[in-house]
Amino acid sequence: MEIIIQPTPEAASLLAARHLAQLIREKPNAVLGLATGHTPLALYRELIRLHREDGLDFSRVTTFNLDEYVGLPPAHPASYHAFMQEHLFAHVNVSPSRIHLPDGLATDIPASCRAYEEAIRAAGGIDLQLLGIGGDGHIGFNEPSSSLASRTRIKTITERTRRDNAYAFATPDAMPHHVLTMGVGTIMDARQVLLLAFGAKKADAIAAALEGPITAMNPASILQMHPVAKYLLDEPAAAKLTRLDYYRWVYDGKPDWQKV
Ligand code: F6R
């Protein structure tokens, strides 16, 4: 685990963007796993800036998003298709044919989820999976009690996550009850994971995920078993970690080439 604590979400997002940009420069046909929500917004803004001002080239990059609401057409403003267009895809030169999100309108959901897994495999697997974390430790929409070996499938959103995400919908009741999400096992197959967490309301989930036991009750805790897991946290999200000073000491002591 590489735990990097930054003073602000902006500082952490700049580091994350620099890390992604370095990957894309080293491997122009990189396969990225992407997330939605508040957490990656500043990171996406910085990637757009790097594309516009520094020529960061997305033309050969392939993307797979973590999740999508069941029943929402891509054009629905609260869909994750629309979110990704608005916050990243419309502003960089990623090829539409290389963009993948689960199909919230699939009529045969199990077949569509199997096809999503197959598309990830056919693309060569995910080089870097970007993650946020729910206040209950969910990654993707793998809520507590999700199998830690799960693959892409349909899941029921918990009441808590429904409350947290209702802001995107005209009324809370308009929010679907189901999502398609990559599984925990799908996420674990990525060659590298980069989890971002900002704000005090993530502090309990982060402390449990990083320092607690591995348990399906906090699906992010399985990332302790991932060989290349990096965590970019702001101070409030890191506040409940017991070994804060140690994490800072380790990061500060790294040679520049090894730092994110
Ligand atoms: C988003 C996703 C979710 C979010 C998580 C945190 O695609 O899969 O796991 O990362 O719910 O959401 P925010 O960033 O809005 O706090």
Image (tube, grey):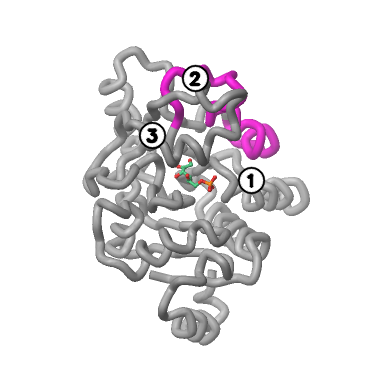
The magenta region covers 68-95
**130 to 70, vertically: above or below:** below
Mark 1 highlights which residue? 57
Residue 131 numbered mark, or none: none
Split into 4 quadrants, where in the image is the N terminus?
Answer: bottom left
**SS state under label 3:** loop
The answer to whether marks 1 and 3 mark residues whose Cβ atoms lie closer than 8 Å is no
Q: Quick one: which residue is furthest to the right in this view?
A: 53
**Which residue lies at the image location 49% right of the left edge and 39% below the top edge?**
63
Foreground: disc 1 or disc 3: 3
**SS state under label 2:** loop
Rounded to the nearest whole Å, what is the CA distance between mark 1 and mark 3?
Answer: 36 Å
Q: Amino acid at mark 3?
A: Ile
Foreground: disc 1 or disc 2: 2
- Looking at the picture, tell me which residue is in the foreground, 64 or 172: 172
**SS state under label 1:** loop
Foreground: disc 3 or disc 2: 3
User: Going from the N terminus, do you reach mark 1 or mark 3 first?
Assistant: 1
**87 to 177, vertically: above or below:** below
Neighbor class of circle 2 (other Cα within 10 Å; few <14, some 14-19, many 20+) is some
**Which residue lies at the image location 57% right of the left edge and 79% below the top edge?**
256
Specify whether 230 is left or right of 37.
left
Q: Position of residue 65 (x, y in %)?
A: 46, 37
- Looking at the picture, tell me which residue is in the foreground, 63 or 231: 231
Specify whether 225 is left or right of 76.
left
Q: Amino acid at mark 1?
A: Asp
Split into 4 quadrants, where in the image is the C terminus?
Answer: bottom right
Mark 2 highlights which residue? 72
Q: Amino acid at mark 2?
A: Leu
